[in-house]
Amino acid sequence: MTEQGSIHLIFPTPFMTFKVKRHEEYKEKYIPFLLEEKRKNPNQKAKWSACDDTWTMFDVEKNITILDSQIRSKIDEYLAFITKSETKLDLYFDSWINIHTSNMYQDQHEHPGSIVSGIYYLQFDNEKDCAVKFINPTQYHIGCWSESMDDEHKIKNSFLDAATYPNKLNIKEGTFVLFPPYAAHSVPKSLIQHDEYRITYVFNAYLK
């Protein structure tokens, strides 16, 4: 009898997704305000607009309160998993709003310097829009590995894909995603052209 070998998937990247309980309240309360701000300042671009096409509003905490007790508790839960400690970290947040038409996008980037980052899908049509796409940091090497094989034996395992596509995270409107700042990601244009907006609340959290 031959001993069966074991396959281990090591060096995983921790992500957390959850449904915001007060989503309908936040959507009704904040989307009209945000669309009015966009109407008044239609060309308000992000600081990094040279590498993307996004309407952005900073200093949102002056007008919008998203980080309620549920979301803060999930952030604590995520960090407890990362640090293996139940001690709550003293954090401050830098947050902003991104609004995209169906033709807008964001190139690949990271959020260096923060301890955790988050994206909340305030308005999003998962049948038309594209959510964040996280990039496998070893995609180049995986590609070279796959190319060394003939067509019959190409690397096809889903866990080796170059990107974690939105359906794998099951992102829908009302979803909050927490992720480490080193996780490279991008936002493609929408799947189809349409007249609605993709609206997200984004934050970086830092230790005080």
Image: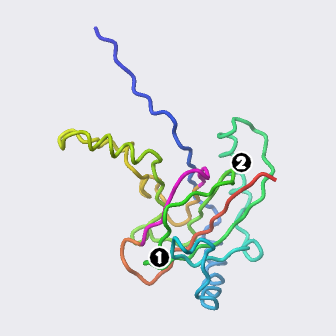
**Mark pair 2, 1: CA separation:** 33 Å
The image quarter containing residue 8 is top left
Q: What is the residue that sits farthest to the top in this orientation? A: 1
Q: Is residue 183 magenta?
A: yes
User: Residue 76 bears which disc, if any?
Assistant: 2
The image quarter in which residue 64 lies: bottom right
Query: The disc labelled 2 sits on which kind of residue?
Result: Asp
**Residue 89 in the image: above or below residue 111:** above
How far from the left and from the top, in percent, is residue 33?
A: 66, 83
Q: Regarding mark 1 in the picture, which secondary structure is present there? A: loop
Depth check, front residue: 26 or 67: 67
**Is 161 contained in the magenta span?**
no
Q: Would you name the residue on which mark 1 appears? A: 104
Magenta extent: 178-189
Q: Nearer the viewer, mark 2 or mark 1?
A: 1
Closest to the observer, 139 or 201 = 139
Q: What percent of the width, then of the height, locates residue 11?
A: 52, 36
Residue depicted at 54% across the width and 76% down the height = 54
Is residue 190 left or right of 60 when viewed as pictured?
A: left
Which amino acid does the dot numbered 1 rest on? Met
Position of 181 relative to 51 (above/below) = above
